[in-house]
Image (tube, coloured by chain):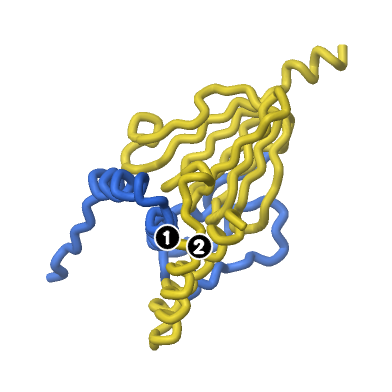
Chain colours: A blue, B yellow
C-alpha cells in the first residue's frame, strides 16, 4: 500500500506544481539532477515532449506540434 | 479455486496522451488503450524500468523518456515511446498511463533523433548556468532514449 502526500513530522517543502511521489520504504531519497538545478517536473516534461515531437517523421510532426500548441498557452505574468 | 483467481486478476490499461491541464480523462487527444485487458506492461520510470503483471503491488511512478511495451493476452506486443508522465497501478490491477507525448515507435525518425541529439550536445557545451545545463542535459537524455529505442 503506498502513501501519497506529505510525511508527518517532516517540515513542509515549497510546492512544485508537479508530481513528487512519496515512495514507501526509501532509505535515501534520490534527487534528480534537473530538480537539483531548479527545474520543475513540468519543465522537464515539456523538454522531453519537445524532443519526441522533434523526432517524429514529417507526416506526423506538424499535427503533433499543432495539437501541443492548441492545449497549453504559456503566459509569463508581469511581476509587480 | 486458484485458476479462477488468476483469471480474475487482469490488467486493465488506459493510456491517454495528456495534452491539456484539465482532467486527463476528457482532455486526452489520443487514447491507445481504454479498459483493455492485457497480460503485461513494461514502463520506463525515473527510478528504473519495470514490468507490471496482474496483482502488481499498487504504485505511483513518474515516467522518463522511454519505451512502453504492452503485451496482449494473445502473445502479441505493441511498443510506444513516451516522453514523460506517470504510471499508476491500482489494487484491482488497473493501470493508468497518462503521458505528455506517446507515439508508436514507427512514427519516430532515427536520423532526426540522432541529429537532434548532436544539436543538444553542442548546446550543452555553450551553457553557463546550472539551469540551462540541466535543460540541455534533459534534451540530450530524451534524444538518447529515442535513438536507443529505435536501434
Query: Mark 1: which secondary structure?
Result: helix
Quadrant where the N terminus of chain B is found in the figure: top right
A49 relative to A27, above or below: above
Nearer the observer, B88 or B112: B112
Residue B111 image point, x, y percent? 48, 62
The quadrant where residue B51 appears: top right
Few, some or many residues within 10 Å of mark 1 (<14, 14–19, 20+): many
Q: Chain of mark 2?
A: B
For residue B142, which numbered disc appears in the image?
A: 2
Residue beneath the point at 40% across and 42% down: B18
Residue B38 image point, x, y percent? 65, 27
Residue beneath the point at 43% across and 74% down: B120
Residue beneath the point at 69% across and 23% down: B10
Q: Is residue B29 left or right of residue B85?
A: left
The quadrant where residue A10 appears: bottom right
Would you say residue A16 is visible in this rendering? Answer: no
Residue beneath the point at 73% across and 16% down: B8
* Residue at the right extreme, as displayed: B1
Estimate the spatial distance between the alpha carbons at disc 2 and disc 1, rounded to whole Å. 6 Å
A45 relative to B130, above or below: above
Residue B147 image point, x, y percent? 56, 61
For residue B49, which numbered disc appears in the image?
A: none
Query: How many marks are shown on the rendered structure?
Result: 2
For residue A51, which numbered disc appears in the image?
A: 1
Quadrant where the C terminus of chain B is found in the figure: bottom right
Nearer the observer, B34 or A79: B34
Q: Is residue A68 left or right of residue B106?
A: left
The answer to the question of whether label 2 and label 1 lie on touching residues, with beta carbons closer than 8 A, is yes
Residue A20 image point, x, y percent? 51, 55
Amino acid at each position: 500500500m503506498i502513501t501519497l502526500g506529505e510525511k508527518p513530522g517532516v517540515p513542509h517543502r515549497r510546492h512544485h506544481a508537479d508530481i513528487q511521489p512519496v515512495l514507501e520504504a526509501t532509505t535515501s531519497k534520490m534527487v534528480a539532477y534537473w530538480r537539483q538545478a531548479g527545474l520543475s517536473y513540468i519543465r522537464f516534461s515539456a523538454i522531453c515532449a519537445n524532443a519526441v515531437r522533434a523526432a517524429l517523421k514529417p507526416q506526423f510532426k506538424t499535427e503533433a506540434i499543432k495539437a501541443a500548441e492548441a492545449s497549453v498557452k504559456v503566459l509569463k505574468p508581469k511581476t509587480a | 479455486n486458484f485458476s479462477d483467481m488468476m483469471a480474475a486478476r487482469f490488467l486493465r490499461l488506459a493510456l491517454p496522451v495528456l495534452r491539456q491541464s484539465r482532467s486527463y480523462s476528457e482532455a486526452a487527444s489520443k487514447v491507445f488503450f481504454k479498459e483493455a485487458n492485457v497480460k503485461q506492461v513494461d514502463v520506463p520510470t525515473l527510478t528504473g524500468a519495470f514490468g507490471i503483471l496482474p496483482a502488481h503491488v499498487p504504485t505511483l511512478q513518474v515516467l522518463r523518456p522511454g519505451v512502453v511495451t504492452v503485451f496482449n493476452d494473445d502473445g502479441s506486443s505493441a511498443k510506444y515511446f513516451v516522453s514523460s508522465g506517470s504510471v499508476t497501478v491500482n489494487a484491482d490491477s488497473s493501470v493508468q498511463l497518462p503521458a505528455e507525448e506517446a507515439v508508436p515507435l514507427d512514427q519516430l525518425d532515427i536520423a532526426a533523433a540522432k541529429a537532434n541529439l548532436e544539436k543538444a550536445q553542442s548546446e550543452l557545451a555553450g551553457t553557463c548556468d546550472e539551469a540551462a545545463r540541466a535543460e540541455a542535459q534533459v534534451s540530450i537524455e530524451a534524444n538518447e532514449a529515442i535513438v536507443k529505442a529505435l536501434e
